[in-house]
Image (spheres, helix red, strand yellow):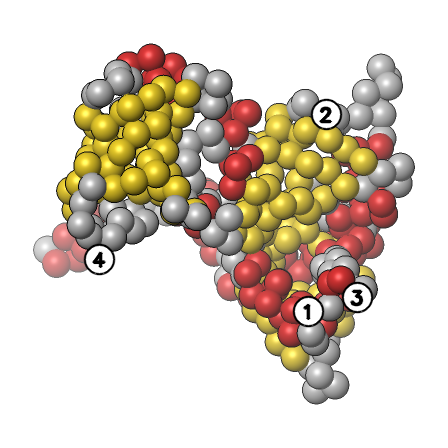
Amino acid sequence: MANETMNLNTPILTLDSDTVLETAQSKADLIWHDIQNAYRTRKILTGILGGIEKTEAGSLIAIIYYKDYRAVIPISEMMINLIQDETHDYGDLSLRQNKVLNNMLGCEIDFVIKGLDTKSRSIVASRKDAMLKKRQIFYFDQDSSGQTKIHEDRIVQARVIAVAEKVVRAEIFGVETSILARDLSFDWLGDARERFQVGEHILVRILTIQGDSPETLSIHADVKSVEGNTSKENLKNCRVQGKYAGTVEDIHKGTVFVRLELGVNAIAHSCYDSRTVGKKDKVSFVVTHIDEDRNVAVGIITRIIKQNL
């Protein structure tokens, strides 16, 4: 009777059962086979920048994780072009490179394998080769109609590779570019880190492309023209002498930049509250004037509803 019960509970062995018998070792062998093929064909692979280390000789290396393997990219092959002249002398170069890499941790990196050691299964790669290859394919190679894949005014997907308070660094098909806060959104944006994260994909519009070779290529892009300006439409609902709640996004040289909850950018030059207004404070705002040319409401902060302590 016990045997009967056991048999009833045993799942039926189907013909495709052997597909799940893949061991961890055979899986690793399969990935290594793909890596060897990619090395032979100079295929561009994508991994995650997962670490920064120093070699015994003291030079920096970037550690890229690709599936279950770790690839090493020397700093010279990471294409971190720091300008070095009298006006850009910010101290020790390796410290600056380290800082740049630090800000990029967690981002996606394209690379081409330069060397393999089958015995230790170690990989040495180059981001530079991958970026130059991508630049050629997307910015210079033309289709039958003479058009390149990426051209001015085209909306494309970009990778966020670093984020600071007032700037987002993006990699767009092999080209890195900095997008300033004013080009990220039509809304007041006090801190880009609240809206953008390293590793995410965003849509950007290509504004300008300069350079006549992959090595000299530079581009300028923005995010805000893709999102559109909602403030313009919302401004129609804003009334002079109207009182609205808002959040302080930034303070610069005595000017307070407030994002009103009805979706409008506002500027205040004075605050009637005895307390000092700060970033992210919730405030009550009275509109005294509507500046349609700049799409902003101008007014006064009457009180701080809630301080961001």
Going from N to C along the chain, the mark reached first, 1 or 4, is 1
Closest to the camera, between mark 2 and mark 4, is 4
Residue at the farthest bottom position: 56
Q: In the image, residue 211 lies at what x, y percent?
A: 85, 38
Going from N to C along the chain, the mark reached first, 2 or 1, is 1
Mark 1 surroundings within 10 Å by alpha-carbon count, few (fewer than 14), some (14 through 19), many (20 or more): few
Please tell me the numbered disc located at residue 152.
2
Going from N to C along the chain, the mark reached first, 3 or 2, is 3
- Amino acid type of the residue tagged 2 in the rendering: Glu
According to the picture, the residue beneath numbered tag 1 turns out to be: 90
CA–CA distance in space, label 2 to label 4: 44 Å
The structure residue drawn at horizontal position 59% and vertical position 67%, both measured from the top left corner, is 99
Going from N to C along the chain, the mark reached first, 2 or 4, is 2
Quadrant in the rendering for residue 154:
top right
According to the picture, the residue beneath numbered tag 3 turns out to be: 86
Q: Secondary structure at mark 3?
A: helix
The structure residue drawn at horizontal position 81% and vertical position 47%, both measured from the top left corner, is 132
CA–CA distance in space, label 2 to label 1: 33 Å
According to the picture, the residue beneath numbered tag 4 turns out to be: 309
The structure residue drawn at horizontal position 35% and vertical position 25%, both measured from the top left corner, is 297
- Amino acid type of the residue tagged 1 in the rendering: Tyr
Taking the image as shown, residue 301 lies to the left or right of residue 97, namely left
Q: In the image, residue 254 lies at what x, y percent?
A: 39, 46
Going from N to C along the chain, the mark reached first, 3 or 4, is 3
